[in-house]
Image (cartoon, grey):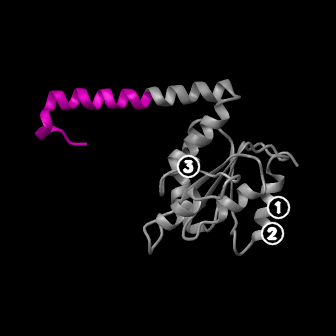
Amino acid sequence: MQSEALVGVVMGSDSDLPVVKDCLAILEELEIPAEVRIMSAHRTPAQVMEYATQAEKRGLKVLIAAAGGAAHLAGVLAAYTLLPVIGLPILGRSLAGMDALFSMVQMPPGIPVATVGVNNGRNAGLLAAQVLSLTDAAIKERLLKYRQSLAQSVVEKDRRLQGEGFRGYSS
C-alpha cells in the first residue's frame, strides 16, 4: 500500500508529541506530507521492524525517530531500512536528554543515524526536508525561501537594535 507521506515520524511514546509537533509543523510549512506513529523499540519491536521494512515500499523517503531515555528507536529503525533515519532525542527526567542523545549518536559502524539536538524537532524536520530537496526542486525552493526569511529576521532585529540601543531593545 503506497502512502502519500514522504516522511515517517515515529515516537517512542505519546509524551514525545510536544517536541514532535515542532517537527510536524515545519514539515507542514514546507508542504511535505508526513505521517506520525507511536511505536516502542522495546514494547512493540515487531511493529517497529515491520514499519521500517515496509517504509520504502509505501513511498516514505526519510524516517524521524523521537525517543528519550535509552532511545533505541532510531537505531532499530535504521537496522531494518536503508532509508535515512534522523534521531530526535527527547529530554528525559534523569539525564537531561544526554542519555537519548548519546544512544542515537553512538551507533555502531555501518548503521548510521543522523541526530539533531535534544528536543529540536524543528531541526529534525528541516534535515528531512534537506534530504528530500536533493531530488525535489520544489522542496529545495521552499527551503531556500525559508532560509531567506531567517536571514531577513536577523537583519531586521539588528536594525532595531541599532535604532533602539541595547537598553531599549526587547526580544
Name the spot of residue 85 as percent of width and height, x first. Answer: 67, 50
**Residue on which disc 2 sits:** 46
For marks 1 and 3, give the CA distance: 23 Å
Q: Nearer the viewer, residue 95 or 15?
A: 95
For marks 3 and 2, give the CA distance: 25 Å
**Residue on which disc 3 sits:** 23
- Going from the N terminus, do you reach mark 3 or mark 2 first? 3
Foreground label between 1 and 3 = 1
Say which mark, if any, is on residue 98: none
Give the farthest residue toward the front: 109
Write down the quadrant of residue 43 in the picture.
Answer: bottom right
Circles 1, 2 touching at the beta carbon (< 8 Å): yes
In this picture, residue 35 sits left or right of residue 152: right
Range drawn in magenta: 149-171
Residue plotted at (85% across, 45% down)? 2
- Check if residue 151 falls in the magenta segment: yes
For marks 1 and 2, give the CA distance: 6 Å
In this picture, residue 1 sits left or right of residue 52: right
- Going from the N terminus, do you reach mark 1 or mark 3 first? 3
- Check if residue 30 falls in the magenta segment: no
**Residue on which disc 1 sits:** 50
Amino acid type at image mark 3: Cys
Q: Is residue 99 above or below residue 161?
A: below
Name the spot of residue 72 as percent of width and height, x first. Answer: 64, 66
Name the spot of residue 75 as percent of width and height, x first. Answer: 67, 60
In this picture, residue 148 sits left or right of residue 41: left
Mark 1 Cα shell of 10 Å, populated few (<14), some (14-19), many (≥20) = few
Q: What element carries label 1?
A: helix
Amino acid type at image mark 1: Glu
State whether residue 31 appears in this view. no
Circles 3, 2 touching at the beta carbon (< 8 Å): no
